[in-house]
Image (cartoon, grey):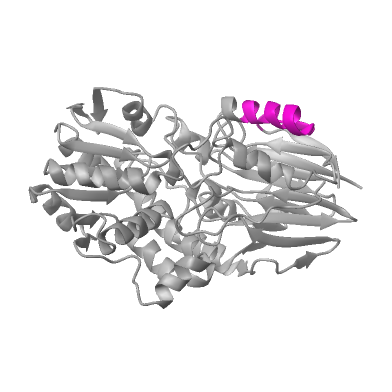
């Protein structure tokens, strides 16, 4: 049987995941995310889809990060009326993420005199079309069976495996880094014919994975010594919860003294509540810790600052402090106000714990910029800028190669499609898969439509 695999987003860049498998009988979409970080992102996200949303039968969602879900309400606005499937935490988190994004879009639309990407009614309709499944719970659509397996990336993240007439294709979504603070290791796919995989860190290795806690401890201790400020731009979903968990363990074990810590993100606070309610999706030793009575997201000195007024009071605290705020790449959110205020001070450390998009403020600072413009303000950077790559939620090059290897030991796949990475990373991983595993790997072009035997 012949099917067509369409690469309508997440190709040549990290964000905007949007893939379609058209079997001729049904059109299955996997993810429908926002393009982020690029200066033309708003225009790109507003463009019509490369296909007719009304002709899509089912949308499968791998996880709730904006670059995988952010255009789902637009898909609905443009005519999609099929079913949406994900794990339960992914749906719960998506609802929160949609609502937050809408508030931001409405503000920007009013400021810039343009239309938001979607409305509250589009969100409501999308959620009404949404059904949930558990890991390893198969659902059937005509001649195609679909199973979600643990991707180990964030709460509820999944790989989507489709089987039809004895053939299997795997969409990895984002693959989790091992070990992660909260998530169990990914389930390695076996005996597949095709794979559509991510490659965010396809050209590098996370050397600091094993020492990330020690590095975090060092930066907290230095902040206390200098009576300084430790600013951590963190994605509200997963990265923030992992950092809170690590600080909780450091303080409650006595490894570091208690320090005033601000979680300055209403979105992250709401997401943390979902984590509290979804402990079955956390790894076993974390569940044991919770069942033993430890509230892993609460420790001495921690404050949740929900309102703008509360956020502004943080600057008035002159002692040693940690500020955790979104966004993780500093392209928006409250973190920019703190960066404007504290990057000028030599006893500030900006600690980057996640991927920084090319051209974004976070990447400029990571690359050593000593002067940056933040919302029209000229900021001379005197702060130290440090990076801990071990907190990344993404698998690195070696882990991605191991993921593919798990399915090729006694069953050679027909093709592996390397996506969701900067061009350099995708091409590097593609060549490694060819050289090391003898796999027929390619990095597709944007909007490519490739015929496969499925």
The answer to which image quadrant residue 360 occupies is top left
Task: Give the residues in magenta.
Answer: 426-446
Which residue: 55% across, 46% down? Answer: 33
Task: Say whether residue 101 is left or right of residue 403.
Answer: left
State whether residue 208 appears in this view.
yes
Is residue 356 found inside the magenta-colored segment of the image? no
Residue located 75% across and 29% down the image: 434
Where residue 317 sits in the image (x, y, percent)?
9, 51
Q: Percent position (x, y) of residue 447?
A: 68, 33
Is 36 located above or below residue 77 in the figure? above
Residue for point 56% across, 43% down: 395
In the figure, is residue 292 to the left or right of 429? left
Visible in this render: residue 233? Answer: no
| Residue 252 falls left or right of residue 440 | left
Magenta segment includes 428: yes
Picture coordinates of residue 247 (x, y %)?
30, 56
Does 293 sit above or below residue 157?
A: below
Towards the viewer: 324 or 320? 320
In the image shown, does 266 or 197 lie closer to the viewer? 197
Q: How many marks?
A: 0
Q: Position of residue 340 (x, y in %)?
A: 19, 36
Along the line of sight, the residue nearer the viewer: 124 or 258: 258
């Amino acid at each position: 049987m012949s099917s067509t695999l369409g690469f309508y987003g997440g190709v040549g860049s990290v964000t905007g995941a949007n893939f379609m498998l058209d079997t001729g009988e049904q059109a299955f979409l996997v993810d429908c995310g926002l393009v982020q970080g690029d200066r033309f992102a708003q225009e790109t996200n507003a463009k019509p889809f490369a296909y007719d949303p009304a002709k899509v039968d089912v949308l499968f969602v791998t996880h709730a990060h904006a670059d995988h879900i952010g255009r789902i309400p637009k898909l609905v606005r443009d005519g999609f009326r099929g079913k949406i499937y994900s794990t339960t935490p992914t749906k719960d988190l998506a609802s929160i993420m949609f609502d937050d994004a809408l508030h931001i879009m409405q503000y920007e639309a009013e400021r810039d005199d343009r239309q938001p990407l979607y409305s509250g009614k589009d969100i409501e309709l999308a959620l009404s079309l949404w059904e949930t499944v558990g890991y390893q719970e198969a659902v059937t659509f005509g001649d195609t069976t679909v199973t979600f397996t643990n991707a180990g990336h964030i709460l509820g993240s999944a790989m989507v495996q489709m089987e039809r007439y004895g053939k299997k294709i795997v969409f990895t979504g984002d693959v989790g880094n091992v070990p992660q603070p909260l998530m169990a290791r990914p389930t390695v796919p076996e005996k597949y014919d095709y794979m559509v995989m991510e490659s965010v860190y396809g050209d590098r290795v996370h050397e600091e994975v094993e020492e990330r806690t020690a590095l975090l401890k060092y930066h907290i201790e230095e902040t206390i010594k200098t009576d300084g400020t430790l600013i951590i731009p963190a994605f509200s979903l997963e990265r923030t919860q992992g950092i809170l968990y690590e600080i909780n363990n450091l303080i409650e074990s006595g490894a570091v003294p208690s320090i005033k810590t601000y979680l300055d993100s209403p979105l992250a606070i709401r997401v943390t509540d979902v984590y509290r309610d979804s402990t079955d999706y956390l790894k076993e030793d974390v569940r044991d810790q919770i069942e033993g009575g430890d509230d892993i997201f609460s420790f001495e000195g921690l404050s949740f600052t929900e309102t703008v007024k509360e956020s502004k009071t943080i600057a008035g605290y002159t002692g040693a402090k940690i500020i955790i705020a979104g966004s993780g790449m500093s392209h928006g959110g409250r973190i920019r106000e703190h960066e404007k205020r504290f990057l000028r001070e030599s006893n500030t450390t900006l600690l980057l714990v996640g991927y920084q998009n090319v051209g974004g403020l976070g990447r400029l600072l990571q690359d050593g910029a000593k002067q940056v413009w933040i919302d029209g303000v000229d900021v001379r950077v005197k702060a130290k800028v440090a990076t801990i790559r071990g907190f990344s939620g993404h698998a690195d090059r070696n882990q991605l190669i191991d993921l593919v290897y798990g399915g090729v030991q006694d069953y050679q796949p027909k093709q592996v499609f390397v996506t969701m990475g900067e061009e350099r990373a995708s091409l590097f991983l593609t060549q490694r898969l060819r050289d090391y595993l003898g796999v027929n790997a390619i990095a597709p072009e944007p909007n490519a439509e490739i015929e496969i035997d499925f």
